[in-house]
Amino acid sequence: MKGRSSLRHRWGRARHSLGARLVMLFLLFAIAVTATFLAGMQSALRFGWHDYAGPLVSDYVDSLVVQIGTPPDVEKARALAARLPLRIRIEGPVVNWSSHPNDRREEWRRQAHPGRERNGSPWRPVRLLPDGHRISFGLANLARSDDSPEDEPRLIGWVTLAVLLLLTALAYLTVRRLLRPLNDIRAGALRYGSGDFSQPIPTRRRDELGDLATQINGMADGLHHLLDAKRQLLLAISHELRSPLTRARLNAELVDESEARSALLHDLSEMRDLITDLLESERLAGGHAALQTELTDLNALVRELVSAQFGARGVQLDLTTDLPALPLDPTRVKLLLRNLLDNALRHGAGASAPPVVSTSRQDDHVLLMVRDHGPGVSEARLQQLGGAFYRADAARARSTGGVGLGLYLCRLVAEAHDGKLTIRNAHPGLAIDVRLPAPTS
């Protein structure tokens, strides 16, 4: 199965590869040119032979037969073979003679092409004498190999095809070298898309592709500075807001108990959580750099968090027993799991079953799933969940949750661990899968 999957993957890549398409184009072009060349040459030779050379050769062979005589005179035939580049063979009831009796190739031709030897061909004419003798002629100097002279055009065709294929391969290598910057540009675009601006696209040549790489590098550099400025501004604002928020909360604590005091403390808590989430999201935007990983038992971490913070909420656990230790940042994974459980408890309130946390091993990754049994989310909004500040309720009422950073942080935590977070409807409820890479044994 893995072999078939690998073949399908390679075939898919070949179908979308510009280099593979160019190879096919070159091959088809070479074959078309060769076929056209051979067809044209054969037509030209056939036309010239039938209309001009054929009658002249036939008349010349008749004159040679007259010189040899009837019955055939071996001495005259030997003199003709010595004077002219001819192969002469006489077969009959009285005379059986060959000008090249020791030539094994002649015997091979007779065995390989018996019909041609009996009836003759344009390059090996045959004449039958009235006394029953048979005289066949051939060109001695053209019979340098096992191929007959009439096979020469075919041999020329194969040689031409081989040369064209060689030229095609050289052309492909040249085009591949010319298009090599496209691979660099593609790799650079993927790096920039993932937020890695540390390595620019190399500029290998000074042509249109080199100019394109330079322009993309300039665009990426501008985006990098823009993102850095935005991040620094966000971090500065968040840090500066912490101190006045802390003072405001302390002052609010001194106010007498009232409904207004409770509402104020609740709003200040939400603002504090928002600032904390913003700071954490900006730290996690750095990927691995923000993590402090250690080999962690994921099942033990799940049990510890559920027992400490959700013990009275009825969360069910379905944990497999064969999980390997994973290189995780325990603090960030607890943040992820806590946000997922908060989301499941909030949207699964009043459901027929409590949220479920499960773990399992699937091929080369570990699956952590949190599922609620609430109403779920419409398919139109499902793909938007996990975006920064997105909340499924259009009114963004505070009674349904925070400001829409919880799932966004979960996605950042998963991606920082080289994992993936996916959200799907479980009918009933919503299931959130976190796939984390597992070490290979």
Image (tube, rainbow, N blue to C red):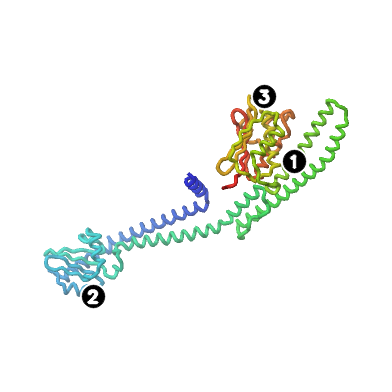
Q: Is residue 43 above or below residue 327?
A: below
Could you say which disc has been placed on residue 83 in the image?
2
- Identify the residue at image location x=70%, y=52%: 221
Q: CA distance from mark 1 to mark 3?
A: 31 Å
Residue 238 sits in quarter: top right
Query: Reading the chain from its start, which is encountered first: label 3 or label 2?
Result: 2
The residue that mark 1 highlights is 278
Query: Reading the chain from its start, which is encountered first: label 1 or label 3?
Result: 1
- Identify the residue at image location x=61%, y=53%: 185
Query: Reading the chain from its start, which is encountered first: label 2 or label 1?
Result: 2
Mark 3: few/some/many CA within 10 Å (<14, 14-19, 20+): few
- Say if residue 187 shows up in the picture: yes
Which element type, helix, strand or loop, lies under badge 2?
helix
Q: CA distance from mark 3 to mark 2?
A: 114 Å
Find residue 211 and report its horizontal and vertical position in percent.
Answer: 63, 56
Find residue 313 and report its horizontal and vertical position in percent.
Answer: 69, 29
The residue that mark 3 highlights is 350
Which of 191 and 425 lies nearest the eye of the viewer?
A: 425
